[in-house]
Amino acid sequence: MAANPANGHQKPNDPPNGGDIELPTLGRRFGALVIDWALCLLVASLYGEPARDGWSPVVALIFIYTVFAGFFAQTPGMALVRIAVVDVDTGDRIGPLRGLLRGLAICLVVPLLVLDDRRRGLHDRLARSIVIPAPRKKP
């Protein structure tokens, strides 16, 4: 796929196998979600008991997606497994509103299970995003 000169991201609007990019596996995506969820449980345990107050880790997850995916194209879990979430058309960051929308949809769980041929769940299609390998940092 062609690089977007404005931000250095690869443009994901080509077919997934039509360029030089291979979409991240579902295992990497699930791994990122598990790491983010563990982080949310840790943060929620600082303010209450997540087992009793089931909403607090969910709110933390929505916050993480709003801020980290929206502004930085990666949640902490995504950064560890080296994937990023970007706009499906431009390859730019999705912004906080679409990060919020994506986070809310992820909390419904079902959107994660309905994938298209580009491994985009309903939450990705709703937010007009796609998960790609994280661009390599230049030394």
Image (cartoon, helix red, strand yellow):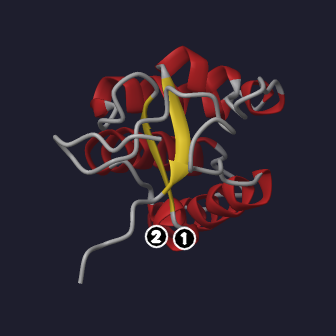
Q: Nearer the viewer, residue 46 or 36?
A: 36
* Residue 56 in view here: no
Tell which residue pokes out farthest to the right in this image: 113
Secondary structure category for the residue under label 2: helix
Residue 89: image quadrant is top left
Q: Which of 30 and 90 is in front in this view?
A: 90
**122, above or below 45, in the image:** above
- Is residue 24 toward the left or the right of residue 85 in the image? right
Residue at 75 percent of width and 54 percent of height = 25
Quadrant of the snapshot with the C terminus:
bottom left
Q: Nearer the viewer, residue 50 or 86?
A: 86
Residue at 77 percent of width and 23 percent of height = 116
The tag on residue 105 is none
Structural crowding at the residue carrying mark 2, measured as other residues with C-alpha within 10 Å and reported as few (<14), some (14–19) or many (≥20): few
Residue 35: image quadrant is bottom right
Structural crowding at the residue carrying mark 1, measured as other residues with C-alpha within 10 Å and reported as few (<14), some (14–19) or many (≥20): some
**55, above or below 135, in the image:** above
**105, above or below 79, in the image:** above
Q: Which residue position holds label 1?
A: 42
Total number of numbered discs in the rendering: 2
Q: What residue type is labelled 2?
A: Leu
Q: Position of residue 88 (x, y in %)?
A: 46, 26
Secondary structure category for the residue under label 1: helix
The tag on residue 46 is 2
Q: Which amino acid does label 1 sit on?
A: Leu
- Is residue 7 toward the left or the right of residue 109 in the image? left
